[in-house]
Image (spheres, grey):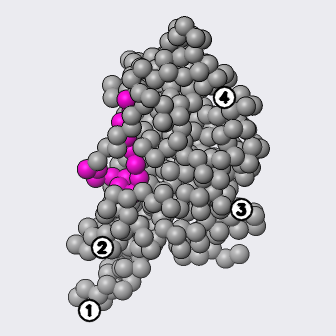
């Protein structure tokens, strides 16, 4: 299969027929269900709940999980889906990540059989939305300092007190996975969002992720039965295992935003006339386009390699950090450079690069900031932890 102008390395040749078919199916979904509407969704800060069950029908929710009604796709297939979704918008890819890699993975990895059977089939179908409450107003990059607590009550159940911040989907979710400090260390709980004392308030006036929902959560004397506890999760290794699932998807997703921005800038430069010739005819424009393409090809190759390692069950957390740090950082540069080719038109929502760049400011912050992943890698190469 010959390489296209945007795939000079013929990276498609590294993918199987089934993987390419899955990618093309998701690409069609994005073209038909997201692209025609994303401008208005972003401008009006609207998250389209109406497409959640459509995503479930396409097998996009918990797609890398097996059993319990989940699609059971490979890590590479999940990555390809994340790339195509983020080429539409980071906010829509983030929904799939929160639902599948965080909320569903928490139950799939750490839940009881009863919990898995109760929640996962409905979540995979998009009939039940979940959220993941780890970050707090004063505990972002350092979850070990979380102030949210869970204590036993006289009935053998639990009482949760505290607050969470930047929790995706919380105001539209039916269940929340809440991580809290107990006498036994950090534990996870499945909290129905209609439980008295649970309040989710959307964070408004955002400059990023406008087609998504992030919330503050208040937990005020939230009382839960004992079976709300995720029995398999003890300590921060519980939420961290789920965060690594989400970070993995970002490695791919960021390249989707970058690729879409590059393609928009390339098409514009070929049509936009300045001084009697197209922008693409100028050396400076070609330098910009080539530099963008170089990083997209390298970042996509990194994503594919990381996915193969994950499917072989040999992927290490430090490798995920490398991919997340590199691909988000380079994607943000690409989106900004693409905007520069568009000139003044690039600041409008008629074109995607600045929207992608704004969204990526959030992506570079959540699931571990650039600084956190840099320190993870620094600790790995020197043997000296530098977090404190």
Q: Which mark is residue 342?
A: 2
| Chain-order first, disc 1 or disc 4 | 4
In contact (CB < 8 Å): disc 1 and disc 4? no
Q: Is residue 208 magenta?
A: yes
Q: Say what secondary structure mark 1 lies in.
A: loop
| Chain-order first, disc 1 or disc 2 | 1
| Chain-order first, disc 2 or disc 4 | 4
Could you tell me which quadrant the N terminus lies in? bottom right
| Chain-order first, disc 4 or disc 3 | 3
Q: Which mark is residue 276?
A: 1
The one of 214 and 127 positioned closer to us in this rendering: 127
Residue range of the region highlighted in magenta in the rendering: 205-218
Quadrant of res 334:
bottom left
In contact (CB < 8 Å): disc 2 and disc 4? no
The one of 308 and 36 positioned closer to us in this rendering: 36
**Left or right: residue 8 compared with residue 288:** right
Mark 3 crowd level (few <14, some 14–19, many ≥20, 10 Å Cα):
some
- Distance (Cα) linking label 1 and label 4: 63 Å
Q: Say what secondary structure mark 2 lies in.
A: helix
- Residue ID for mark 3: 19
Q: Say what secondary structure mark 4 lies in.
A: helix
| Chain-order first, disc 3 or disc 2 | 3
Seen at 44% across and 29% down, the residue is: 196
The one of 169 and 296 positioned closer to us in this rendering: 169
Q: Nearer the viewer, mark 4 or mark 3?
A: 4
- Residue ID for mark 4: 110
Seen at 42% across and 20% down, the residue is: 221
Q: Nearer the viewer, mark 2 or mark 4?
A: 4
Residue farthest toward the bottom in the current orientation of the protein: 276
């Amino acid at each position: 299969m010959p390489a296209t102008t945007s795939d000079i390395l013929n990276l498609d040749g590294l993918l199987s027929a089934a993987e390419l078919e899955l990618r093309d199916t998701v690409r069609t979904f994005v073209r038909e269900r997201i692209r025609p509407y994303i401008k208005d969704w972003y401008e009006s800060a609207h998250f389209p709940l109406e497409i959640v069950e459509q995503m479930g029908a396409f097998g996009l929710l918990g797609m890398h999980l097996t059993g319990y009604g989940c699609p059971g796709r490979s890590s590479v297939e999940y990555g390809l889906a994340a790339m195509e979704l983020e080429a539409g918008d980071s906010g829509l890819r983030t929904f799939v990540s929160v639902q599948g890699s965080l909320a569903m993975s928490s139950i799939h990895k750490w839940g009881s059989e009863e919990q898995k059977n109760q929640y996962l089939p409905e979540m995979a179908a998009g009939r039940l939305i979940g959220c993941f409450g780890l970050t707090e107003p004063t505990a972002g990059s350092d979850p070990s300092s979380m102030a949210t607590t869970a204590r036993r009550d006289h009935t053998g159940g639990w009482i949760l007190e505290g607050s969470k911040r930047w929790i995706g989907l919380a105001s539209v979710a039916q269940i929340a996975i809440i991580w809290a400090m107990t006498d036994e260390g950090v534990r996870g709980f499945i909290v129905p969002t209609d439980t008295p004392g649970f309040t989710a308030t959307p964070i408004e006036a955002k400059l990023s992720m406008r087609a998504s929902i992030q919330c503050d959560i208040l937990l005020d004397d939230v009382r839960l039965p004992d079976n709300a506890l995720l029995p398999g999760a003890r300590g921060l290794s519980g939420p961290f295992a789920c965060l690594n699932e989400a970070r993995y998807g970002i490695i791919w997703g960021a390249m989707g935003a970058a690729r879409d921005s590059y393609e928009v800038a390339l098409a514009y430069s070929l049509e936009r006339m300045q001084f009697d010739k197209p922008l693409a005819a100028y050396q400076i424009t070609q330098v910009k386009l080539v530099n963008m393409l170089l990083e997209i090809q390298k970042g996509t190759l990194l994503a594919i390699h990381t996915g193969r390692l994950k499917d072989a069950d040999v992927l290490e957390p430090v490798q995920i950090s490398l991919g997340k740090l590199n691909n988000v950082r380079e994607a943000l540069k690409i989106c900004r450079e693409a905007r520069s080719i568009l000139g003044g038109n690039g600041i409008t929502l008629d074109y995607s690069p600045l929207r992608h760049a704004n969204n990526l400011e959030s992506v570079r912050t959540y699931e571990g900031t650039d600084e956190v992943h840099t320190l993870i890698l620094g600790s790995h190469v020197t043997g000296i932890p530098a977090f404190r």
